[in-house]
Image (cartoon, rainbow, N blue to C red):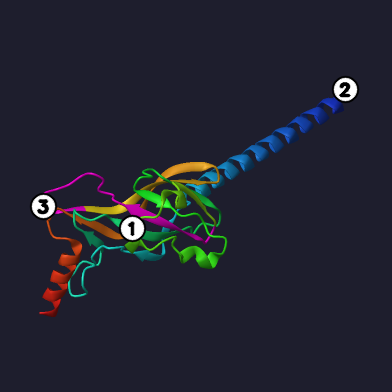
Amino acid sequence: MTRVARVDSAGVGRSRGRGRRAAWIVSVFLVLVAGVAAWQVAARTARVEPGSFYSTGTGARLPDCVPGDAIWAMFGTDEGVVLAQAVRNPSPWPVTVSSTDPHVFRFEPIAEDELDDVVLVNDPLDGEPDRSQTSARVVIPPGREAALWIVDPQRERTISSGWMMFDVAELKLRALGVERRFSLPLAGTIAVGGADLTTRQLGRDLQEACDA
């Protein structure tokens, strides 16, 4: 007699159902992993950059005949260093920018009108703004700019000769829930000298040398 094995169709159906559920769970897991990876990449590649304007304040600028395009402004040790530059957010999402040294680097709030992004609360030639007009943190919308004030990066340090150089602002960026440190290049190098000459004298001497 030939025996025919009986097939448990219910068991086969349950097995196939479990297989489909497992495949679905794996697919969802892979989508989530890809989403998290994309989110991390997007958040960690957020950045800010020097914007469309800057001001040297009372600092001396090198005349055109003197090599040194990287020098933004030069100050003597007897002068207060006050400069301002724009910081732009080129990312497609808002970026929160925080100063790691609020005594030196502070931000103006974002203006309501984008056309006012380039308007400073006061002229750097008149000194630093009142601290109530600036903040250690600003949220910059996509494509917008905020004014960054730089005040006395040398603090109380002095040198008898030579120059102290400053060319970056150390910041913290927060985008899409992820925060990281970021070094923003300044509009150029700020040179604070240890010589007795003021920058006004230095600027006149350099210009006279160029004109000679």
Q: Which residue is mark 1?
A: 127
Mark 3–mark 1 distance (CA, rounded to whole Å): 25 Å
> Does residue 169 appear left or right of residue 157 in this picture?
right
Specify which label sits upstream in the sequence, 3 or 1: 1
170 or 205, which is in the foreground? Answer: 205
Give the magenta range: 142-164
Nearer the observer: mark 1 or 2; the answer is: 1
Looking at the image, residue 58 lies above or below residue 101: below
Say if the magenta span includes residue 160: yes
Tell me the residue at 66%/40% (across/down).
27
**For the residue labelled by badge 1, is the local secondary structure a helix, a strand or a loop?**
loop
194 or 46, which is in the foreground? Answer: 194
Amino acid identity at mark 3: Ser
Please give the label number shown on residue 161: 3
Secondary structure mostly seen in the magenta stretch: loop
Mark 1–mark 2 distance (CA, rounded to whole Å): 105 Å
Tell me the residue at 54%/58% (across/down).
142
Say if the magenta span includes residue 107: no
Image quadrant in which the N terminus is located: top right
Q: Which residue is mark 2?
A: 2
Please give the label number shown on residue 74: none
Tell me the residue at 38%/43% (across/down).
100
**For the residue labelled by badge 2, is the local secondary structure a helix, a strand or a loop?**
loop
Spot the residue most to the bottom: 212
Amino acid identity at mark 2: Thr
Amino acid identity at mark 1: Gly
Specify which label sits upstream in the sequence, 3 or 2: 2
Mark 3–mark 2 distance (CA, rounded to whole Å): 108 Å
Specify which label sits upstream in the sequence, 1 or 2: 2
* Total numbered circles: 3
How far from the left and from the top, in percent, is residue 34?
58, 44
